[in-house]
Image (spheres, grey):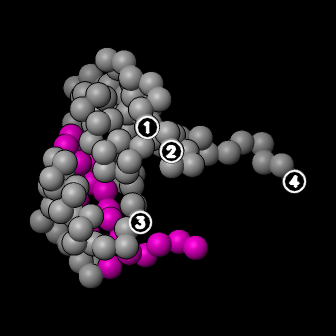
């Protein structure tokens, strides 16, 4: 049976789509498909990853806080240390709370979204 719909993109709200788009384009080696003041789309990961401007964006607080995390990206890597070093070099920060640092690391992108790098790579 053909599905009625399929996942096309994951979109991240942010204050500066170009800045966040550049971060993820470099981190994931994706191509910028569309770039405007209010929207950036990246391709090359099987689905699009998009960033869209939201006025008065408030970064989520993780693991607890007044602004909950609504979703986060899980990025599969083969080398946690190398991936963490690259992400931090591109502008990410390491979260203070690390629930399972041998299997995954929680990082914060340049505008405050938590994301994980993990060696738990799906088949």
Mark 3–mark 2 distance (CA, rounded to whole Å): 15 Å
Tell me: residue 11, above or below residue 46: above
x%, y% of residue 11? 44, 38
Answer above or below: position of 2 versus 64. above
- The answer to whether residue 57 of the structure is visible from this angle is no
Give the Cα separation between the discs numbered 4 and 1.
32 Å
Of badges 4 and 1, nearer the viewer stands: 1
Distance (Cα) linking label 1 and label 2: 6 Å
What kind of element bears circle 3?
Answer: strand
The residue that mark 4 highlights is 1
Please name the residue that numbered disc 3 is placed on: 76
The magenta span reads 103-123
Residue visible at 39% across and 55% down? Answer: 73
* Contact between labelled residues 2 and 1, with CB atoms less than 8 Å apart: yes
According to the picture, the residue beneath numbered tag 1 turns out to be 31
Alpha-carbon distance for marks 1 and 3?
A: 18 Å
Pick the front one: 26 or 2: 26
Q: Quadrant of the C terminus?
A: bottom right
Q: Secondary structure at mark 1?
A: strand
* Secondary-structure class at tag 4: loop
Label 2 belongs to which residue? 44
Q: Earlier in the sequence, mark 4 or mark 2?
A: 4
């Amino acid at each position: 049976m053909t599905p009625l719909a399929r996942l096309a993109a994951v979109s991240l709200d942010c204050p500066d789509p170009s800045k966040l788009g550049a971060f993820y384009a470099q981190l994931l080696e994706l191509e910028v498909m569309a770039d405007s003041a209010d929207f950036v789309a990246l391709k090359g990961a099987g689905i699009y990853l998009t960033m869209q401007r939201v006025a008065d964006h408030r970064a989520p607080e993780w693991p607890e806080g007044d602004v909950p995390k609504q979703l986060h990206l899980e990025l599969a890597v083969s080398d946690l240390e190398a991936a963490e070093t690259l992400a931090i070099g591109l502008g990410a920060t390491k979260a203070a709370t690390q629930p399972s640092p041998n299997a995954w690391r929680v990082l914060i992108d340049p505008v405050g979204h938590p994301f994980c790098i993990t060696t738990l790579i799906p088949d």
